[in-house]
Image: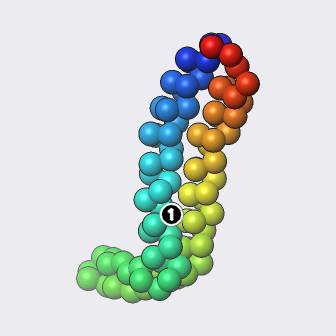
Amino acid sequence: MTRQTGIIITVVLAVLVACPSIFCCLFGALSAAGQGTFTGISDQTGQIPPAVGVGLICLSVIGLLVPVASWFFLVRGKTA
C-alpha cells in the first residue's frame, strides 16, 4: 500500500467516523451536564441520565481515535 492510499483511507475515516463522533461528544457533554431532555410517546418528557452522557463521551473518544490510529499505522513513517 502506498502513502497516497493511506492518506485517502485516513481522510475517509475522518469524515465517516470522526465527524459524527464530535457531535456525539457534544451531545454527551450536554447530557452529562444535565441539559439533555427527551420526548417520548404520548408527549412524555424527561431528563436523560448523566450516565448516558458519560457513555457517549467515551464512545466519541474511541471514534476520534480511529482516524488517528489509521494515520499512525498507514501513513506515518512511509516515504513518498
Characterize the local packing of mark 1: few (<14), some (14-19) or many (20 or more) Cα atoms within 10 angstroms: many
Locate residue 4: give its quadrant. Answer: top right
Q: Is residue 70 left or right of 33 when viewed as pictured?
A: right
Residue pushed farthest front?
80
Q: Where is residue 40 in the image (x, y as percent from the top left)?
A: 33, 77
Task: Please report the residue visible at 45 percent of the width from the left and 66 percent of the height from the top.
Answer: 26
Which quadrant would the N terminus be assigned to in this image? top right
Pick out the residue farthest to the left. Answer: 43
Tell me if residue 24 comes above or below residue 19 in the rendering. below
Decide which of 46, 55 is in the foreground and name it: 55
Decide: is 3 above or below 38: above
Q: Residue at x 50, y 40 (%)?
A: 14
* Amino acid at dot 1: Cys
Residue 28 at what x, y percent from top left?
50, 70
Q: State the colouring used for the structure image.
A: rainbow
Question: Position of 64 compared to 47: left or right?
Answer: right
| Left or right: 59 in relation to 20 | right
Q: In the rendering, at what x and y percent does residue 19 appear?
A: 44, 48
Image quarter (top left, top right, bottom left or bottom right) of the C terminus? top right
Q: Which residue is drawn at 43% across and 59% down?
A: 23
Q: Nearer the viewer, residue 55 or 4?
A: 4
- Marks counted in the figure total 1
Dot 1 corresponds to which residue? 25
Quick one: SS at disc 1? helix
Does residue 38 sit above or below 18 in this rendering? below
Look at the picture and state if 10 lies above or below 30. Answer: above
Residue at x 48%, y 32% (from the top left corner): 12
